[in-house]
Image: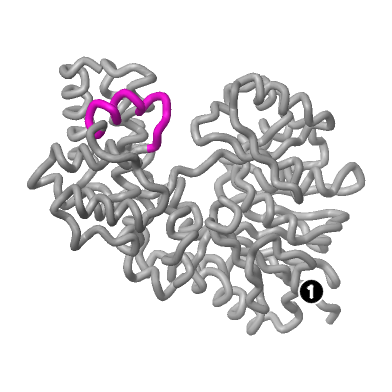
Amino acid sequence: MNPNIAANQQRLFLAFVAELRPHLRRDSSLPRRIKDIFARNRAIGSRDRKLYRELVYTYLRFLPWIDGLLDTDAPLAAKITAWLAPELKPTSAYRAAHAGDWPTVPATLAEKAALLSTLTPLASSLTPHALLPAWFLEHCPAAFESPHLDALNSRANIWVRIQANDRNLVLDEFRAQGWVIEQPADFPDALCLPPNADVAGSDAYRRGFVEIQDLGSQLVLAHAPRVSGRWLDACAGAGGKTLQLARMLGANGHVDATDIRPEILDELDDRAKRARLDNITIVQKPAADYDGVLVDAPCSGSGTWRRQPHLKWYVQPETIAAFQQTQLEILAANAPRVKAGGRLIYATCSMSHHENQDTVAAFLKSHPNFIAEKPAENHGGSFDNLGTLLLPGTRNTDGFYVALLRKEAQ
């Protein structure tokens, strides 16, 4: 790479980081801010935007290892960021220009920290545990241990769920792209793709043959096999689980979908049409007597920190306490909508026990006509007698929690 180009790219990266730093712990929508910053710099093309995006997200992921240097040795901070950035086509030349004289990046966080401590004056701050907020240790001790800590601080793969009758329509196109494809033996319709795979630009996606959905998200409903009848997705959002539930129910079942954000349901409507699913109805006022209600509750999102590293520094204990109150309110509002013998499924993409088993325990205490069921399969998660927690390092997924709550007859 031309040295002048390399120097200019480093300068721009440091300028972007300087603009973001005041907002790190105050802006839950930091990705939107990042996108806006890039959009204002019209001189950078799409490939450069990909480079800067990878660099900025690497900085956010490894913030405690980098941030302290920005005010004292910004070039070294930029070099560490380049070294830690994932080896992808947009980053390859930049990494070689700025960190090519350093050894190959080791696989584990412990090895990265040990090697960096010999290359930089940062030995005291280079601990793997520093890459998660210290207060979170009480919420989920396992997140601070390998392999979960490594997974939480790595670039996430893209998972898709096949929803075509002929799987080869998807597989043939993706293989032609040169993408390395991994398929879990127990979930053949789930595909793991490289982090930079442009699935949304594929013909399979445009034709509704695949949906982008993390395997952890897919496993939420896999804990409740043999679903049937009429269901409500009470927090449908853009509808990833709604579409999966509709396919599980088939032609003889139906899903009503609702959300407190009606504007986001437009995307669900588009996705349902693209997937040719006609057993989904978007409703504003759900009915009663559903065979099942899915509450994929709003939460802190700690299970998604590998994809949204900014949330590690934004979320605080009081944030989680506020979400827990909201979760209990949503569960209480939807409990009467489940018919006797029906099932209430509670799910979060959180790893905090306050949002998971504590929320379920509090709900069951105030609703004694519901009981927690043990799933027939835990799919790699751990059952705590109330629900199942799936951690990121087990199956290379986001972190999820799911509880199956059966309503008994009065």
Q: Quadrant of the N terminus?
A: top left
Residue farthest to the right? 252
Q: Residues within 10 Å of mark 1 (few under 14, many from 20)?
A: many
The residue at the point 78 percent across, 72 percent down is 406
The residue at the point 55 percent across, 61 percent down is 391
Q: Is residue 381 magenta?
A: no
- The one nearer the camera, 166 or 406, is 166
The residue at the point 32 percent across, 37 percent down is 33
Identify the amino acid type marked 1: Lys
Q: Is residue 89 magenta?
A: yes
Instruction: Look at the image and give the residue range highlighted in magenta.
Output: 86-99
* 137 relative position to 256: left or right: left
The spot of residue 343 in percent (x, y) is: 78, 66
- The one nearer the camera, 197 or 17, is 197
**Is residue 265 among the parts visible in the rendering?**
no
The residue at the point 45 percent across, 43 percent down is 155
* 92 relative position to 385: left or right: left
For disc 1, the marked residue is 407
- The one nearer the camera, 197 or 109, is 109
Q: Determine whether 342 is above or below 184 in the image.
A: below
Count of labels in the image: 1
Q: Determine whether 73 is above or below 174 in the image.
A: below
